[in-house]
Image: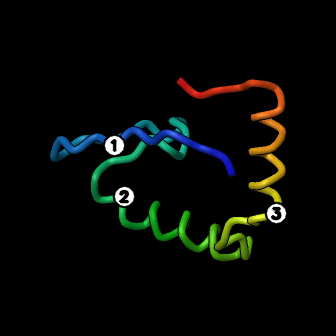
């Protein structure tokens, strides 16, 4: 799963340059942006975690002594 950041300009009357990345938005664009991301997520059919894959990742991390701080 990827992680992405989004910049939202809430100032009324603000405009974003047309060549700005699609993750730079004005407040009125946020609803459409979130709907498209939700539809993209649903299309992948990756709604649930794979418990076997998670267990493998945990085993691999613990066997190497990796910890999160």
Residue hosting label 2:
30
Disc 2 element: helix
**What separation in Å lies between label 1 and label 2 (alpha carbons)?**
8 Å
Snapshot quadrant of residue 11: top left
Q: Residue at x 53, y 46 (%)?
A: 22
**What separation in Å lies between label 1 and label 3 (alpha carbons)?**
37 Å
Above or below: residue 37 compared with residue 14: below
Q: Residue at x 70, y 75 (%)?
A: 43
Rendering coords of residue 29 (x, y %): 37, 58
Residue hosting label 3:
52
Categorize mark 2 by other alpha carbons within 10 Å: few (<14), some (14-19), many (20+).
some
**What separation in Å lies between label 3 and label 2 (alpha carbons)?**
35 Å
Q: Residue 56: which disc?
A: none
Left or right, 34 with respect to 57, comes to left
Nearer the observer, 2 or 69: 69
Numbered label tally:
3
Residue hosting label 1:
8
Q: Residue at x 15, y 46 (%)?
A: 12
Rendering coords of residue 2 (x, y %): 66, 46
Q: Are marks 1 and 2 in contact (CB under 8 Å)?
A: yes
Disc 3 element: helix
Nearer the observer, 15 or 56: 56
């Amino acid at each position: 799963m990827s992680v992405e950041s989004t910049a939202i300009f809430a100032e009324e009357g603000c405009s974003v340059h047309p060549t700005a990345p699609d993750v730079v938005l004005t407040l009125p664009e946020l609803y459409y942006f979130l709907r498209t991301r939700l539809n993209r997520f649903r299309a992948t059919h990756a709604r649930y975690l794979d418990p076997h894959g998670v267990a493998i990742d945990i085993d691999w991390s613990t066997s190497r002594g990796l910890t999160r701080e």
